[in-house]
Image (tube, grey):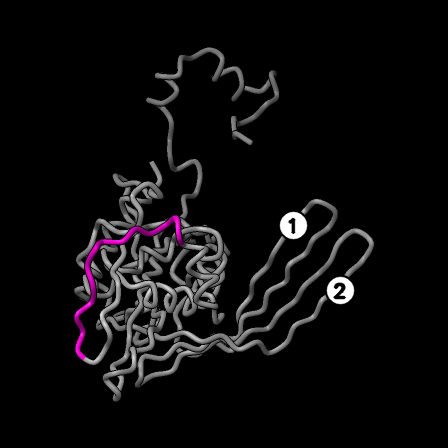
Amino acid sequence: MTHTGNSDPNSLDHQNHVNISEQQFLETYDPGDFERPSVTVDMLVFTIRSETQENYRKLAEPELQLLLIRRGGHPYMGQWALPGGFVSMQESLEDAARRELFTETGLDDIYLEQLYTWGDVHRDPRTRVISCSYMALVDSSELQLQAGDDASEADWFRMEQRLLEEKRHIHERGRVTERRVQLILTNGTEELSAVIETKETLEGRVRSSHITMNEVQGIAFDHAKIIYYALERLRAKVEYTDIAFNLMPETFTLTALQKVYETISGKKLLAAAFRRKIADWVIETGEYTGNAGHRPSRLYRLNPERLAP
C-alpha cells in the first residue's frame, strides 16, 4: 500500500496537496516528518575449502565454510559477526553489498544473491537498523581475506547443525512444524553456537514461518538467525539449480563437483545418478588432472548454454 497522507478530502493536508504541483510539494517536503531507520547490508560469504590429507593418495574432503569478522569496536566488541556495513544515501543496496564484499575479499565479479530483509525492532542496540542479507559464493583459490574498518580480524568457520527436537502437528486446515537446532561454528581455535527455533505454519493456502534464537555464544547481533536461514536456502537451491558451480574453479573433475554437492546438501549421492543429473550442465575440456598420487581424471567446465541470459 502506498502512503499518501491524510485521505480525508476535507482535510487541510489533502487540500494543500490538490492545490500545489508535485514540484512545489517536493521543494517543501521535510524528510524529518518521519523517523528514518538506518539500513545495512550483511554478507554471507560461503566457500569450499579442503583440509590437507595425511594420505596424499586420498582426495581431500571439502568443507563448506563461512567468512566471519571479529568486531573491533562496540557493540559486541570481540564477538564474531557477518561482514557488512551501513548503506550510504548515494548507493543502492546491491552497490553497498558489492562494496563490502570487495573490502573483505578483494573480489567483485562473483555470484551474489539477495536473501532476506531483517527488521526486528530491537535487533541492533545502537538504533533502529534494518538489514538486507546477501549470499556470495566464492572459489576459495581466488580469495584474499582482509578485515574491514570495524573488524580486528577475519577468518573462515566450519558449520554444523544438530537437530535437538522436532514436532509436527497436522490439523484439518494444514500443519505446524517446530524445530530446535543447535548451530555450531568453529575455526579450529574457537567455537561459537546458538540454538535456533523455527515454527513453520500452513493454514489453508497461507504459509508463514518464524525464527528465534537462544543460548547465543560468541555470535553478534541476530547473525545466528541469518546464518541458519542462509544455510537452509543454499541447501534447498542446490537441489534444483546450478548454484554449486559458483563454488568451483573454472575447470573441475566430476568427483570434485559431486563432493561439493554432497557437502552442501549433507547427503551421499550415487555417482551414476549424480552424473545423469548434471550431464547437461557440464562439457569436457579435453584436459586431464596431473596431480601426483592420483590417476588422471577428465576436467570439465560449466556448459555456457546453461548460463542465464
Label whose residue precedes the other's in the sequence (1 or 2): 2
What residue is shown at x 31% (from left), y 55% (from top)? 246
Q: Nearer the viewer, residue 250 or 179?
A: 250
Real-space CA distance between mark 1 and mark 2, rounded to the nearest whole angstrom: 15 Å
What residue is shown at x 21% (from left), y 51% (from top)? 108
Q: Within 10 angstroms of label 2, few (less than 14), some, or many (20 or more) residues?
A: few
Is 22 located above or below residue 95 in the figure? above
Q: Which residue is most to the right?
A: 172
Question: What amino acid is at disc 2?
Answer: His
The answer to whether mark 1 and mark 2 are in CB contact below 8 A is no
Q: Which mark is residue 169?
A: 2
Q: Report if residue 285 lies within the magenta region.
A: yes
What residue is shown at x 29% (from left), y 71% (from top)? 49
- Quarter of the figure with the N terminus: top right
Is 161 located above or below residue 31 in the figure? below
Can you give x and y, in whole percent of width and height, for residue 150 in the image? 24, 65
Q: Which residue is most to the top?
A: 19
Residue where numbered disc 1 is placed: 207
For the residue labelled by badge 1, is the local secondary structure a helix, a strand or a loop? strand
Can you give x and y, in whole percent of width and height, for residue 177 in the image? 67, 63
What residue is shown at x 65% (from left), y 50% (from top)? 207
Q: Which residue is most to the bottom?
A: 54
Q: Nearer the viewer, residue 215 or 12?
A: 215
Q: Report if residue 37 lies within the magenta region.
A: no
Left or right: 203, with 67 as reference point: right
Can you give x and y, in whole percent of width and height, for residue 78 in the image? 30, 76
Q: Which mark is residue 283?
A: none
Q: Nearer the viewer, residue 248 or 201?
A: 248
Question: What amino acid is at disc 1?
Answer: Arg
The magenta-colored residue range is: 279-292
